[in-house]
Image (cartoon, rainbow, N blue to C red):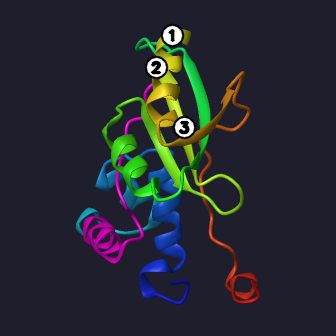
Amino acid sequence: MLGDKLFDDIGLKILLTLQKNARISFSDLGRRVGLSSPAVAERIHRMEEAGYIKEYRTIVDTEKIGFPITAFISVTASVGRLGELDDVVRLIPEVLEAYHLSGTEDLMLKIVAATMTHLEEIINQVGNFGETRTSLVLSSPVTSRMITPLPRSAAGSR
């Protein structure tokens, strides 16, 4: 919540810095935000417990590890099959992200595949639960963007 003490100017600087480099040392981060290493470590720990920081990740170049194809598959589930579909996509390792949607489609999947045949296999797996529509990613002009909170006055008006 924007009024939270953890989310003051120092908290914002910590979040922005960690989004750029989650491997930064507490001492380096402390120097950047004006706190001691133990104070930064404690602040980060409290931000994790409060849910501001959900997890830390390594972003892998999927093409370099054998998955040159990225695609989005939208699924309009057959009546009563969305729960089953959710269970199945959780088990497909090539599914990087899955989102329930409003509108015509029920689920949007971001997947990677090694070949077009592999992509077809994934489409067939999820297609057992409804109608699919697949779009291949040609390029990604924005792949990962740091999120900065709205100013307090703008957040209240949305």
Which residues are drawn in magenta? 39-61
Number of numbered labels in the structure image: 3
* Point 28% across, 73% down: residue: 49
Label 2 – label 1 distance at C-alpha: 6 Å
Q: Is residue 109 above or below residue 51?
A: above
Residue depth check, mark 3 versus mark 1: number of the one nearer the observer: 1
Q: Residue at x 68, y 74 (%)?
A: 150
Question: Is residue 77 left or right of 121 when viewed as pictured?
Answer: right
Q: Which residue is the site of mark 2?
A: 121
Rendered image: mark on residue 110 = 3
Q: Amino acid at mark 1?
A: Thr
| Magenta segment includes 125 | no
Q: Earlier in the sequence, mark 3 or mark 2?
A: 3
Q: Is residue 47 left or right of residue 62?
A: left
- The verdict on residue 53 being magenta is yes
Q: Position of residue 29 (x, y in %)?
A: 39, 56
SS for dot 3 = strand
Question: Looking at the image, do the residues carrying marks 2 and 1 touch, with CB atoms under 8 Å apart?
Answer: yes
- 150 vs 54, nearest the viewer: 54
Mark 2 burial class by Cα count in 10 Å: few <14, some 14-19, many 20+: few
Q: Which residue is mark 1?
A: 117
Q: Amino acid at mark 2?
A: Glu
Q: CA distance from mark 3 to mark 1?
A: 17 Å
